[in-house]
Image (spheres, rainbow, N blue to C red):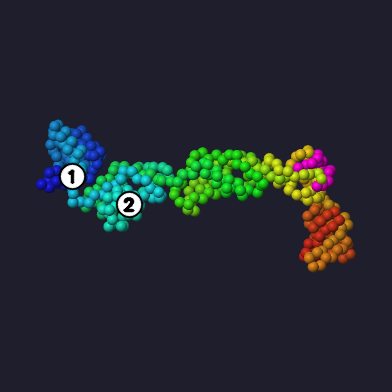
Amino acid sequence: MERTAWCGSKDMYDFLTNTTPSARLRSLRDILTSRSHPSSAEEGSRAHQNVLPIWTAAPRLRSGVSAILMIAVLLLAGPLYARPDLPHVTILSQVSVKDSRVLISDLLTSETRQTLASLDRIKNISIALAPLPGKAKMLDGRVIRERLSEYGITADRFFIQIPEQIRLERQGQTLLPTDVESLAREQFLSKLPWDDVQLQEIAIPEPVVLPYGKVELDFQRPGRTDLARPFYLNIDFRVDGQLVKRLYVRTALTVSDTVAVAARDLVPSDKITADDIHFEKRPLKSTLQKPVSDASFFEGRKPRAAIAMGEPLFEEMFVAVPLIRRGDTVTLVFDDGRIRVSAQGQSLASGSKGDRIRVMNATSHVELTAEVVNETTVRIVTGSIERISK
């Protein structure tokens, strides 16, 4: 006797072979709680489409004892009514993937992969987006059944077993906070311009889980950041060249550099010489202030205010003193590396060392642009000669 005949209808057979035990339980619950006429079952079938086929296929379920016996049969019937002549397709209840998309092939048991080996076209069919690395989510089994049917994998050709819910996990690679700290020392601190930079704190709150692939970290600091004070470091995490995560982490450094230090008390009227300073390595209170790194800096400059002995010297603490004032007699020097010519002239503006000012040749009255060299000499800038009308 064929199994469909024993069950009473093709609907009953399909129900027994293509539903899970929990689905059968819900259907039977609706049968037992409905009234004794088909219309009640029809109302219940709106919630569970298997109710009406069971009702029409097995009328005796409406009697008490028969219903209880039939429940036991139905709960155990699924495996008994699998047609042996149909190939089996079984979906795993829990899957772990590496990539960002879940393929149908990821969900199949090894036996099912062999069964469907001839259907190459379904192997790379995307079924869902994977969760974030290190995370998990649930996938409705009905989605799998619908996608399989689109490719001809249906109950009339295969015996299909699909869990109601499939748990999807995304694998990932993990960077510990100590790993990120080591990379920060290697890739960020080593590129800073100061003599000695020590990492005091980098507040990575937890391990960083990333997709599989080649990992690269890019450390960036906002412009005009004072690295001698706590600041927020921007860390971009890239995998195979793609940005996958970005963190802003509190970071604290100790920055030391070799700086000029006052060897005595300095006052604004002082002309500072090499004997007034010495150089030593000091922790910087601010990286936004540029320390004096060479004694030649003090030529033509004086302190803006009094400076105590032992205090580190920064460029902002000094102001340029005009070496030449308007009307001063100066020596004009032209030197292009092949010809050197000098002449007397007159300053038409005041200027400090390195400033460009207008000067005039005392003999020819030609007006020129020149760079201040010292208190008595200016260097003519090539191409600056202009004839002045008398």
Residue at which label 1 appears: 81
Q: What residue type is labelled 1?
A: Tyr
Indicate the quadrant where residue 270 lies: top right
Residue that appears at 79% across and 41% down: 263
Q: In this view, does 248 lie to the left or right of 118?
A: right
- Mark 1 lies on a secondary structure that is loop
Q: In this view, does 199 lie to the left or right of 39?
A: right
Q: In this view, does 208 lie to the left or right of 115?
A: right
- Mark 2 lies on a secondary structure that is helix
Question: In front here: 276 or 297?
Answer: 276
Upstream in the sequence, badge 1 or badge 2?
1
Question: In front here: 377 or 174?
Answer: 174
Q: Is residue 166 left or right of residue 75?
A: right
Question: In front here: 37 or 178?
Answer: 178
Residue 148 in view (yes/no): no
Magenta residue span: 261-274
Residue at which label 2 appears: 105
Question: In front here: 306 or 194?
Answer: 194
Q: What residue type is labelled 2?
A: Ser
Label 2 crowd bin: few (<14), some (14–19), many (20+), radius 10 Å: some
Residue that appears at 62% across and 42% down: 198
Residue that appears at 37% across and 46% down: 96
Return the x and y of residue 223 as percentages of the image width and height.
62, 47
Is residue 45 magenta-colored?
no
Return the x and y of residue 129 as percentages of the image width and height.
38, 48
* Mark pair 1, 2: CA separation: 26 Å
